[in-house]
């Protein structure tokens, strides 16, 4: 009897929770409302089956509860009933699969006029590339990746010279037109994931993957990594900014092309030394692993860093001063703090940039 | 009544073969009886105890993860690296070293010979070796906790490249030991698995036709066949990844710049590993689920005092599900970067599986209908299984339907789904089975009151734990995150209230985890202090309840093996004196059937 009541409570509770839950799909910001619709259809069909079978089971348990004088029926099979149930289930499955495949057919069919944007993943930060004035992305090869060519473009490919590179933490997109996201990884698997867009796709080293969508709502959205990619997976973030065409073009103009980057011009950022340092800490992905508020993370926190005595993995200790900071930025594996893995990549910075970053570090240290 | 195997007639009795029975080798020493035993029943206990011990460790790991998610930073030793190491070890232990070992090595070993009327497995010596190789695999796995860098943190899927690159914890010793441990597991399992298959096909007693076997045996048999076909894919992918790691081959490794360092790999495909892994990984789901299906079918029938509804369809459903499970693997890879057109094929095959699976659910519920339901502890667990399996099965339709999977994949919806369907429901089936067969194994009943308490906390607790988790996933919260708070704080789309759900889940998890202590206490205490059970406390028809001794001695049955005259589900037969007729009772008096 208790079981019957609990089963009914669980069924009713589940349904009530579903309708009252404040935790549900985020407001959509792309053309993929049809994905939400198929999800709703699936919820209706599955919800009906869930409620019907469980309530029937609860009723059966109540009606046929043990009685000394009762004898169960002897009924090995009932072909007619079994056929009906099979047919009914098949119809239900088709009702969910057919709309699903219909939407999938649209999902895999990328519009010819879609704007190309490339997202490049590495442990644990995002970079982006736009095709530039010629509309063609230059060829790439992971073997070309080095300090002055972080995205591995082919320096001899004329199509790549005008490609716009964004190593900062934001990708901008104009509202209203279809976008084909091309995805590429330099090291391990990642996954480009913006919940409000609905679609997502893995980044796989050695190949280029893609998906498409049309941005439909102006705003800023978090970009997350949805495929486990190592220690800093949870903090591999970026922002997607959806804006009017004019704003987008204005922003694009401020980003350097590949040619400019090779020539060392175009990344002239203004502001004070500390502001430049703060920008660098974001662009270089430092803050994915080093927290600013003292919380535990992949690398040591920056809060209270300067002047701290750190114990190193070889047991010796070191006072964190400007010299140690600079050494650890340029050659991180030289003196690794105890309790942390030697996984920080050496930063490739000019002397000015190094000064700026250290200035910011001192400020962040507090 | 069209079922040929239900009723007895003169033709279906198979006469004894004119071969003298060979006396079993009976061990003479304590060591031979209880440690290096060749008795399937002892080996079953060894498998079960080892699996549950290592499962307890995985349970503790899950509680630690939940504490970090509910109260970030509360336990300072849980670093981001430690967290994903816990995630990995929890998953790997639970799926392979607990559930697979317990269902096949544990229940398979105990029940196959007894339920089929055999003296033992057909290769007792190989059976013994199988356990010791499994134990060695477990020890290797545990050893990885004590290596430099700790165990691997690559997720239980062990995806390269990250599994063998320095940005992942345990990319040196950890992953190497993990892979070697899996290789030994597969070797050990293959020895056991061949044994189970040959025993089912060759060692059934007189009259035990295939279509008279209890569904438990059908399910364990089919699951074993699946495992024998699926584990080789895991074996080769593990070996190939180790070659990439240790010898510098490039099966799965393309050109890579890892943490600023150009690596010497080129041309390999990470997606190839995923195909191999999931060619094993999806059948693995059914290797765990099918035995649970079979066990629950039998528990429902025994305790509802009614034959299982639609036995033949149930057998075919098991076989069809097993077969289909080999052509759906890429539904784990809809967003992996494989050719998107594969989505049409794999979504269709995946949703076709829903049909035989739904038939099983209907038949379980219809078995209860017009029964005489005794709500014993095993029965409570069986019903708990059906309830949670319906929930987990239905959310599988969301994830199998390719376009619906896209927003949900890699979120907590996936975590909630696979826990409901392959953790909660199978473990409820395991508990039901333990409460059901414990009287046969020990000769004593488990304490009923403690059993009920354990059931209510476990069943209600687990449902309240996993049901809300689905909604975190629909919201979009990604899985395998040490913390939702990234460098820029909480992502905009996650409201602060989501943390309530996390705390709620963690509290439920702690309640459920601690209630397992009650279960363990019951297991130990009842072995000596439980109520004596007698040979057949539930009034069951299958052969393991008809042994001359309880617990059964070496050789299982008395001087002569039983002969089988009927199917396994003759409950409440009209005209029969009792409400069950054991399989080894011929037609005649008391059965209501003419001899």
Image (cartoon, rainbow, N blue to C red):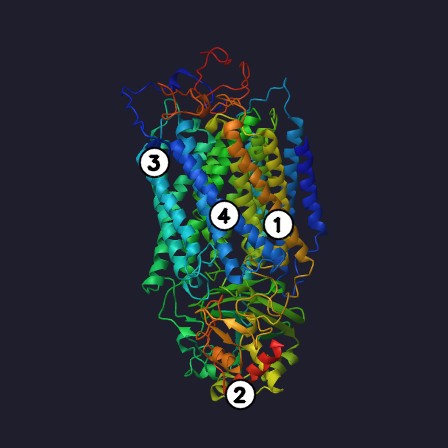
Label 1 – label 2 distance at C-alpha: 57 Å
The answer to whether residue A67 is visible is yes
Q: Earlier in the sequence, mark 1 or mark 2?
A: 1
Helix, strand or loop for disc 1: helix
* Residue under numbered circle 3: B36
What label sits on residue B124 in the rendered view? none
Say if labels 1 and 4 share a chain.
no
**In the image, is residue A286 above or below residue B271?**
below
**In the image, is residue B139 above or below residue A344?**
above
Left-right relation of B346 to A143: right
Label 2 – label 3 distance at C-alpha: 71 Å
Badge 1 density bin: few <14, some 14–19, many ≥20, Cα 10 Å: many
Badge 2 density bin: few <14, some 14–19, many ≥20, Cα 10 Å: few
Residue B89: give x, y in percent of width and height.
47, 53
Are the residues flagged by discs 4 and 3 in contact, CB closer than 8 Å? no
Residue A39: give x, y in percent of width and height.
62, 53
Say if labels 3 and 1 share a chain.
no
* Residue under numbered circle 1: A42
Are the residues flagged by discs 3 and 1 in contact, CB closer than 8 Å? no
What label sits on residue B57 in the rendered view? 4
Q: Nearer the viewer, residue B262 or B6?
A: B262
* Residue under numbered circle 2: A352
Helix, strand or loop for disc 3: loop
Q: Nearer the viewer, residue A319 or B121?
A: A319
- Residue drawn at x 39%, y 35% as measured from the top left: B43
Label 3 – label 1 distance at C-alpha: 53 Å
**In the image, is residue A301 above or below residue A268?**
above
Label 1 – label 4 distance at C-alpha: 37 Å
Please tell me whether mark 1 or mark 4 is closer to you in this view: 4
Q: Residue under mark 1: which chain is it in?
A: A
Q: Residue under mark 3: which chain is it in?
A: B
């Amino acid at each position: 009897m208790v079981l019957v009541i609990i089963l009914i409570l669980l069924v009713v509770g589940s349904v009530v929770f579903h309708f009252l839950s404040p935790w549900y799909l985020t407001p959509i910001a792309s053309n993929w409302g049809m994905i939400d619709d198929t999800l709703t259809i699936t919820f209706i069909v599955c919800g009906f089956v869930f409620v019907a079978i469980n309530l029937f089971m609860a009723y059966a348990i109540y009606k046929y509860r043990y009685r000394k004088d009762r004898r169960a029926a002897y009924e090995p099979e009932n072909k007619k009933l079994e056929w009906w149930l099979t047919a009914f289930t098949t119809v239900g499955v088709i009702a969910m699969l057919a709309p699903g495949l219909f939407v999938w057919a649209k999902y895999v069919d990328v519009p010819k006029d879609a704007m190309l944007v490339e997202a490049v993943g590495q442990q644990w930060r995002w970079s982006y590339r736009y095709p530039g004035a010629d509309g063609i992305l230059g060829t790439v090869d992971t073997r070309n990746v080095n300090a002055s060519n972080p995205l591995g473009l082919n320096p001899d490919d004329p199509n790549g010279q005008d490609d716009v590179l964004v190593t900062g933490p934001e990708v901008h997109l104009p509202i209203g037109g279809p976008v084909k996201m091309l995805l590429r990884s330099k090291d391990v698997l990642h996954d480009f994931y913006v919940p409000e867009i609905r679609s997502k796709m893995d980044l796989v080293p050695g190949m280029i993957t893609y998906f498409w969508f049309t941005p439909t709502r102006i705003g800023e959205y978090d970009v997350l990594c949805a495929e486990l990619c190592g220690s800093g997976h949870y903090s591999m973030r970026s922002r997607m900014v959806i804006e009017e065409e004019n704003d987008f073009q204005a922003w694009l103009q401020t980003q350097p092309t590949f040619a400019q980057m090779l020539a060392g011009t175009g990344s002239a950022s203004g502001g004070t030394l500390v502001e430049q340092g703060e920008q660098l800490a974001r662009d270089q992905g430092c803050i994915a692993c080093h927290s600013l508020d003292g919380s535990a993370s992949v690398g040591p926190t920056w809060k209270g860093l300067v002047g701290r005595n750190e114990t190193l993995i070889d047991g010796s200790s070191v006072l964190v001063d400007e010299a140690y900071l600079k050494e650890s930025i340029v050659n991180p594996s030289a003196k690794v703090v105890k309790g942390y893995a030697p996984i920080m990549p050496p930063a490739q910075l000019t002397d000015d940039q190094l000064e700026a970053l250290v200035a910011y570090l001192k400020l962040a240290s507090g | 009544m069209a079922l040929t195997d239900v009723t007895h007639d003169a033709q279906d009795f198979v006469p004894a073969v004119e071969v003298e029975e060979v006396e079993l080798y009976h061990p003479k020493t304590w060591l031979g009886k209880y440690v290096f035993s060749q008795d399937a029943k002892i080996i079953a206990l060894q498998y079960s105890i080892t699996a549950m011990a290592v499962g307890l460790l995985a349970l503790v790991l899950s509680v630690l993860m939940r504490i970090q998610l509910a109260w970030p930073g509360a336990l300072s030793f849980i670093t981001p690296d430690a967290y994903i190491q816990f995630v990995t070890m929890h998953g790997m232990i639970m799926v392979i070293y607990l559930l697979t070992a317990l269902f096949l090595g544990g229940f398979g070993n105990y029940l196959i010979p007894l339920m089929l009327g055999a003296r033992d497995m057909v290769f007792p010596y190989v059976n013994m070796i199988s356990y010791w190789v499994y134990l060695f695999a477990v020890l290797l796995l545990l050893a990885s906790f004590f290596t430099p860098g700790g165990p691997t943190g690559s997720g239980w899927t062990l995806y390269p490249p990250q599994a063998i690159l320095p940005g992942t914890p345990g990319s040196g010793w950890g992953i190497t030991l993990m892979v070697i441990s899996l290789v030994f597991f597969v070797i050990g399992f293959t020895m056991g698995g061949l044994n189970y298959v040959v025993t089912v096909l060759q060692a059934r007693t007189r009259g035990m036709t295939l279509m008279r076997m209890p569904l438990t045996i059908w399910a364990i048999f089919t699951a074993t066949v699946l495992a024998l076909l699926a584990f080789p894919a895991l074996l080769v992918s593990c070996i190939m990844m180790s070659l990439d790691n240790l010898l510098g081959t490039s099966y799965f490794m393309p050109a890579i710049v890892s943490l600023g360092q150009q690596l010497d790999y080129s041309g390999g495909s990470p997606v190839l590993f995923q195909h191999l892994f999931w060619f094993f990984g999806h059948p693995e789901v059914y290797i765990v689920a099918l035995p649970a299906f079979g066990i629950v079918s039998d528990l429902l029938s025994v305790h509802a005092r009614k034959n299982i509804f639609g036995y033949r369809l149930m057998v075919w459903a098991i076989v069809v599900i097993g077969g289909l499970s080999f052509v759906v693997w890429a539904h784990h890879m809809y967003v992996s970067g494989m050719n998107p057109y594969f989505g049409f094929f794999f979504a269709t095959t995946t949703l076709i599986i829903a049909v035989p699976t739904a038939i099983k659910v209907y038949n379980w519920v219809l078995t209860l209908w017009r029964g005489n339901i005794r709500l014993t502890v095993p029965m409570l667990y069986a019903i708990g299984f059906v309830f949670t399996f319906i929930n987990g099965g239905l959310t599988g339709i969301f994830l199998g339907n390719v376009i619906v999977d896209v927003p949900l994949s890699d979120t907590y919806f996936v975590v909630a789904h696979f826990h409901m369907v392959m953790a909660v429901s199978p473990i409820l089936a395991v508990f039901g089975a333990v409460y059901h067969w414990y009287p046969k194994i020990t000769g004593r009943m488990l304490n009923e009151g403690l059993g009920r308490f354990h059931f209510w906390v476990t069943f209600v607790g687990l449902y309240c734990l996993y049901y809300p988790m689905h909604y975190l996933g629909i919201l979009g919260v990604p899985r395998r995150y040490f913390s939702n708070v990234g460098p820029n704080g909480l992502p905009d789309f996650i409201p602060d209230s989501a943390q309530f759900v996390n705390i709620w889940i963690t509290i439920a998890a702690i309640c459920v985890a601690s209630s397992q202590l009650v279960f363990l206490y019951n297991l130990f205490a009842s072995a000596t202090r439980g109520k004596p059970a007698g040979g057949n406390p539930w009034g069951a028809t299958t052969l393991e309840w008809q042994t001359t001794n309880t617990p059964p001695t070496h050789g299982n049955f008395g001087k002569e093996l039983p002969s089988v005259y009927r199917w396994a589900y003759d409950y409440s037969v009209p005209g029969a004196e009792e409400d069950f007729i054991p399989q080894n009772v011929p037609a005649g008096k008391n059965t209501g059937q003419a001899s």
